[in-house]
Image (tube, rainbow, N blue to C red):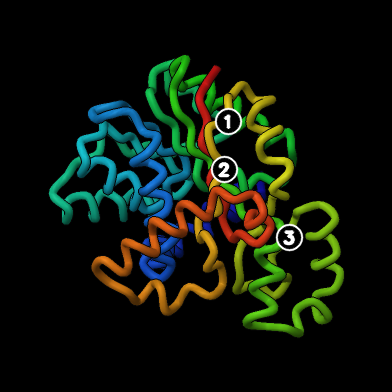
Amino acid sequence: MEVMADIEKYYDQKAQQEWDRLERHRTEFAVTMRAFEEYLPKPPAKVLDIGGGPGRYAISLTQQGYTVTLVDLSKSCLEFAKDRAKEAGVELAGYVHGNATDLAQFPSESYDVVLLMGPLYHLLTIEDRQKALHEAGRVLRSGGSIFASFIGRYAQIRYAAKHVPTWIVEHRQRCEELLATGVLKARPEGGGFTDAYFAHPSEIKPFMEEGGFETLDLIACEGVISMIEEKVNDLTGELWQAWVELNYRLGKDPTLHGAAEHLLYVGRKR
């Protein structure tokens, strides 16, 4: 499948960059970890991290005592994760090269938690997103927890407003396709992100619930500081923690979801 090959190639070249991304965007990482704190079962619960890339979340959860298997389309990301886990003094339960739409190597109902924090925005059709969700649900035990990430429909527009205001005119056709369908094709000249799907906040809960999950939460991972995060991300100590808590609380406010860069769905398998 050509799109999957392009995505695999992209992340094979971007393992370090993807690891560093969550250093630059500390609030996204911290708010996600805060959601784990609230909703994960206690360790050593079994976690399948599908599309976890270079393993930042997988390694952090392993350090907390969880039994984490990392699955990713990129072999380079998996090798990177192995090296980083070794540096951190931990060993993941497994590193598996695989595709979120076909997890046949994993038995049904074999995990307490599934992380699907990446694949859904690389699957351009509803059918492929449904396949990935079906597979995530299949390997998850009844009553198990799912954490699924989405890129917000207007994230690229907000990025353009801040960094490249001419984008909406220079890429008018791509912009209109994004607004109409959620699909943003990669730049023809290369050098940017892959083809991707940007979800409208209103579709997330129905999509997940139709896939067999009970909704527990939907959180804007940047809270109230989407696109204005730099000064907050430079903070340390108690002031930093205060902002993490505030952004976690405000990220649950549906009125902020349309301005989110990343949305985290938390659910339970029915």
Looking at the picture, does residue 136 appear above or below residue 241? above
Q: Position of residue 103 (x, y in %)?
A: 50, 27
What is the CA distance from the residue labelled 2 to the residue labelled 1? 8 Å
| Circle 3 Cα neighbour tier, 10 Å, few/some/many (<14 / 14–19 / ≥20) | many
Reading the chain from its start, which is encountered first: label 3 or label 1? Answer: 3
- Measured in 3D between alpha carbons, the distance from the residue under mark 3 to the one under mark 2, in whole angstroms, is 23 Å
Residue 66 in the image: x percent, y percent?
Answer: 25, 34
Instruction: Give the number of the mark in front: 3 or 2.
Output: 2
Pointer 1 residue: 215
Amino acid residing under circle 3: Leu
Kind of residue at badge 2? Leu
The three-letter amino acid code for the residue at tag 1 is Thr
Q: Which residue is mark 3?
A: 184
Secondary structure under the numbered disc 1 in the rendered image: strand
Q: Quadrant of residue 240?
A: bottom left
Label 3: state its secondary structure. Answer: strand
